Amino acid sequence: NQRWLKPAFIRCCEILASSALFSVVTTLLTIFALFGDDVRLMRFKKVNDYVFDIMTLSAMGIFSVEIVASTFGKVGYKYGFFFWLDILSTATLILDVTTVSELAFGDTISSAEASDNG
């Protein structure tokens, strides 16, 4: 009854993992993941943090989909170097979410911003 599900899922993973469009999207999100938080801190006010938080959480979701697609759709990916690198880099993105970073490290950026404007 569900025998078609597994091959269909694996085929979808293969298609997604080899998609040029998906590769471009994940590359752009990688650039955002590398520089987005720095841009947020340099150029935007605290009231705009939620936009970056949404973008970061969205990037984490898309990177998670990429990990699943590559795990089932690329030969040799599972438990390889890039598998662990992708998991670690995706997991550490949570530290770029404002609420998480403020809870973990304090809210020193906002207090500095307030004294600059004061």
Image (cartoon, rainbow, N blue to C red):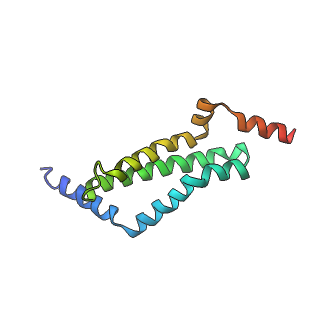
Q: What residue is rendered at 40% in x and 46% in y?
A: 87
Q: What residue is rendered at 60% in x and 54% in y?
A: 35
Q: What residue is rendered at 61% in x and 39% in y?
A: 98
Q: Position of residue 48 (x, y in %)?
A: 68, 47
Residue farthest to the bottom, as pictured: 20
Q: State the residue in front, 65 or 76.
A: 76
Q: Judge from the rendering whether residue 109 lies leftward or rightward of residue 74; answer left or right.
A: right
Q: Judge from the rendering whether residue 45 lies leftward or rightward of residue 1; answer left or right.
A: right
State how many labels appear: 0
Q: State the residue in front, 61 or 70.
A: 70
Residue 46 vertical placement versus 32 (above, below): above
Q: Position of residue 88 (x, y in %)?
A: 43, 44
Residue 18 vertical placement versus 118 (above, below): below
Residue farthest to the right, as pictured: 118
Residue 23 vertical placement versus 35 (above, below): below
Which image quarter: residue 100? top right
Q: What residue is rendered at 13% in x and 52% in y?
A: 3
Q: Judge from the rendering whether residue 48 lies leftward or rightward of residue 59; answer left or right.
A: right
Quadrant location of the C terminus in the rendered image? top right
Which image quarter: residue 19? bottom left
Residue 14 vertical placement versus 62 (above, below): below
Q: Position of residue 32 (x, y in %)?
A: 56, 56
Q: Judge from the rendering whether residue 19 lies leftward or rightward of residue 43; answer left or right.
A: left
